[in-house]
Amino acid sequence: QGAALARCALRGGPRRFASMSPDQQAKAIEKLCSQGPFSWQTVGGDGERPALKKEYCFNDFSQAWSFMSRAALLAEKMDHHPEWFNVYSVVDVTLTTHDTGGISDKDVRMAEAMDEFAQELLRTRKDEPSPGGDGGGPDMVTHH
C-alpha cells in the first residue's frame, strides 16, 4: 500500500506538497504511530521543525543497505530526501518537508513506502532463523 501511494504521488513527476492541515496531520500520524513496536514517532515542536522519526534495525548491513537503496530510488523520484543515518544494521530515519516547515503528505507517503520496503525485505528472508532463535524468521525492531 505504501509503495502504491508513493507511486500515485509520482504521477506527473515531482510536485510541491502543501503542509497538511492539523486534522489531516493528526490522522496520518496516528495511523503511522499506532503500529506497536513498528511505529513512527513525532519529534520537534516548541520552536523546532516537526518531523516523523523511526529507527529500523535489520539483521545485517546488507539488509539495511538494500532498504536504503530502495528508499533512495523512491526519494529521487519523489524529489523528497530523508535525513538518515546508518551504522551496520541500523537505519535511523527522519522525515520532514523543509519547504513547508513541518510534516506534509509527502512525508506520510514516504514513511508508508519505507515501512512496506522494510517488511518486504524481511519477508524475503523469513526462512532464516531469527536472532531470537524462534525459527520464525527475522523481525524488524525499532527503538525509541
Image (cartoon, rainbow, N blue to C red):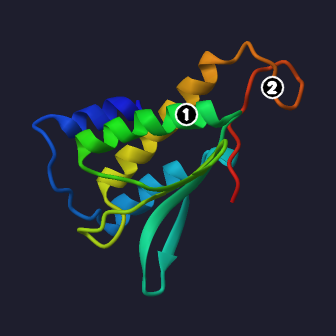
Residue at 44% over, 35% down: 69
Residue drawn at x 35%, y 69% is: 102
Q: For the point 66% across and 44% down, which residue is it?
A: 88
**In the displayed structure image, the side of residue 8 where residue 121 appears, left or right:** right
Q: Secondary structure at mark 2?
A: loop
State the image quarter where residue 129 is shown.
top right
Residue 95 percent location from the top left of the image: 42, 58
Residue 128: mark: none
Q: Quadrant of the N terminus?
A: top left
Residue at numbered disc 1: 118
Residue type at numbered disc 2? Ser
Q: Amino acid at mark 1?
A: Ala
Residue 40 visible to an observer of this rendering: no
Q: Quadrant of residue 77?
A: top left
Q: Which mark is residue 130?
A: 2
Above or below for 78 versus 143: above
